[in-house]
Image (cartoon, coloured by chain):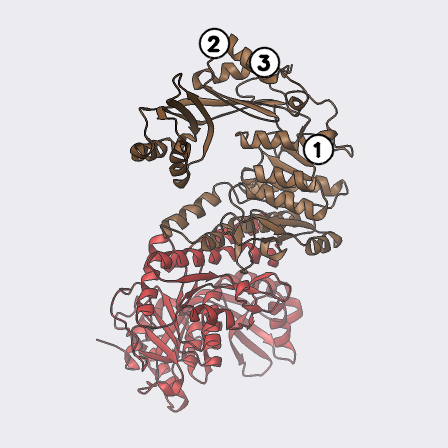
Chain colours: A brown, B red
Amino acid sequence: MKFGGTSVADLEKIRNVARHVRREVTAGHEVSVIVSAMAGKTNELVDWCEQACDDYDASEYDAVVASGEQVTAGLLALTLQDMGIAARSWAGWQIPVQTDGFHGKARIMDIPPDNLVAALDEGKVNVIAGFQGIGPDGRITTLGRGGSDTSAVAVAAALGARCDIYTDVDGVYTTDPRIEAKARRLERISYEEMLELASLGAKVLQTRSVELAMTYNVPLRVRSSFDDPDGPFQVTEDGRGPGTLVCEEDEIVEQQVVSGIAYSRDEAQVAIRKVKDKPGVSASIFGPLADAGISVDMIVQNVSADGEFANLTFTVARGDLKKALDVLAREKDNIGFGELASSDEVAKISVVGIGMRSHAGVASKMFRVLSEKGINIEAITTSEIKVSVLIDEAYLELAIRALHSAYGLDGA
Amino acid sequence: MKFGGTSVADLEKIRNVARHVRREVTAGHEVSVIVSAMAGKTNELVDWCEQACDDYDASEYDAVVASGEQVTAGLLALTLQDMGIAARSWAGWQIPVQTDGFHGKARIMDIPPDNLVAALDEGKVNVIAGFQGIGPDGRITTLGRGGSDTSAVAVAAALGARCDIYTDVDGVYTTDPRIEAKARRLERISYEEMLELASLGAKVLQTRSVELAMTYNVPLRVRSSFDDPDGPFQVTEDGRGPGTLVCEEDEIVEQQVVSGIAYSRDEAQVAIRKVKDKPGVSASIFGPLADAGISVDMIVQNVSADGEFANLTFTVARGDLKKALDVLAREKDNIGFGELASSDEVAKISVVGIGMRSHAGVASKMFRVLSEKGINIEAITTSEIKVSVLIDEAYLELAIRALHSAYGLDGA
């Protein structure tokens, strides 16, 4: 069971979490709980590090920031004890959660299960500080933002357990219910689809945790910490229950062609007109951008009729736009281009579904539906199970609702 | 160097601490720094533990509360790095500070110096989370309130270093300067005297830290963290400098007969009249008090002329008075006594000095001075280097000033 920062924001919420744990213990399960820091606490600690040192040492940052989860783990163990449930807390280094040495964004290498199993054998609930481990240098490491999801999946893999992620939403939806009221909660979704959704900005699960769950085949359930914790035990042996189960594709019986519509407003578009179409020109553009730490997403290149010049359009994260334009202006002579245009009023909309592998026509339906609504497509990218398009942000809601209906996702 | 909670209360104060460290590093010293949690932080964490669980598990309490020092250590290491000084933080378990298993009030068993020495050899400042260690069970322990002083002395002993305790006063005074403006800062004081002063309520140093310094002969300097940190290097090779040096008796050349006047308002007096003077009666009184966790300090017993009854007077901490009276009322039939009287308007005043060992007349001078001022003595206790009397609290300031003058302690 994993609970994020908003679920453990104060002692009352921690008591609510303890009730969820009690329900599972009462149902006869052996339980290990992974907790984040209290909401806001990690930001406070990060701020302090940044104030203390302009160019901070990631190993000290880790020592400071990991303390947040240590506090929550101890407080949840105490709260469980207060309810008469045997429990003990674990810091990452005590288990130990062995990571590589990349402080601030470490990767878990191994979690020997012996200590956790011994405590379970003594009838205790393990309460584990998420987001942290110990590096080869014997110092505390952290896994980077969202790392507690990864901790939870890694612990579940080490123990051969299922992993229930409790969050502030009650599952994964066909699209954002704030935009389309007819959005439906998915009973199940495949790891691959969840990965596409996670990386597309559906912020329910952290991408690395889904990758890890897929690798070790850990059944991953996303459910709400606001469910009545003292309600009846809700997950059945065959995997039905509240929230959404992220699982292997072949465990999903009634697979839809399209599972969901994702979107991202965190997009900005850069258009470079009249680029000399010569070998090495792409490198002269994208090399300096990469050096500046700017990730480029969609890229479209149109060669003009005479073949001499090309127009190049690409997208970056909205917060990187100004920096990208600065880099390009600086490199203008080196690249050689006519004009530079940009917009931060664009959005990306994506149709995701495992069924696309075996069903043609998903992309063409998308283009037709958008065209019927008069929505222009600025750029397109595809993967085996996803089609993404860039559109004017003003049309985003309209597009989502039209596609949601067209792919038969509308609920009651 | 050890800095308490008020000296590291925020990032600006931590930067001030870093300047003190820089001064010592610049003077060519190898430096290890012990820090407390930011002021108020430990109380907040303790409150949370108490709210989480009525009868909290001390090992979880330790896991939660020790996080405060971990944060400060990391932030000071970062601040030093920001000033261009190589530094790294240590949690207690990393060094390791090995303690016994008494969670919440553990005692340090050993500090292997190897890790700290290796970092010093690499030119780094060690920044150590005070107040904490690791128990035989591999879990975090804390040393109890004031434990950071003890951590500092133990680290100094392990490294063969001197120990400078930075606090919010600039040394040990002949008496409380808020009561007697003529109080003088002592250049030096012996461990034994400091122990008497510490246990008498002069809250400059924690008693256990002084005991430890005496055992391992660690030169202990009490000085102010508000001194100009960028002033010239101030402690000379022969031990002169700011603050007060706590050291061996024979290192104090101009030893005064009396070094200081201490006092405590945290006193309450209980008088039991007409106690049957028979064997076992003391046990019937003090046994139940001890069972109730009440410490008794001064005891005076007067047997009446006929030898049948005695009057018994003793003191307890003011906060224990009500509980003590309840215990005695409950045990009245068992003890057998006439009346019970009490007062919480009493205070203890103590004259402390190594010189008493070789100079008679210190106690008699005390009694004479108090008598001349018309101050009645309710009870007396003595040790080899201390005379304490209990008086009416209303006369406390008058008594302190009279004694301070009589023993020649008045400064300019």
How crowded pointer 2 is (Cα within 10 Å; few <14, some 14-19, many 20+) is rated as few
* Tags 3 and 1 touching, CB below 8 Å: no
Q: Residue at x 51, y 55 (%)?
A: B67
- The amino acid type found where label 2 is placed reads Gly
Q: Which corner quadrant of the image does residue B303 belong to?
A: bottom right
Q: Amino acid at mark 3?
A: Lys
The chain carrying label 2 is A
Q: Which quadrant of the structure image shows residue A19?
A: top right
Q: Which residue is mark 2?
A: A374
Which residue in the structure is indicated by mark 1? A248
Q: CA distance from mark 3 to mark 2?
A: 14 Å
Quote the CA–CA distance across marks 3 and 1: 27 Å
Marks 3 & 2, CB-CB < 8 Å contact: no
Q: Is residue B80 above or below residue A192?
A: below
Q: Which mark is residue B274?
A: none
Chain on which label 1 sits: A
Residue at the image position 64 percent from the left and 33 percent from the top: A222
| SS at circle 3 | helix
Please tell me which of labels 3 and 2 falls first in the chain.
3
Local crowd at mark 1 within 10 Å, few (<14), some, or many (≥20)?
some
Position of A340 relative to B266 (above/below): above
| SS class, disc 2 | loop
How far across and down, in percent of the image, does residue A10 sit? 53, 42
Instruction: Indicate whether A67 appears above or below A225.
Output: below
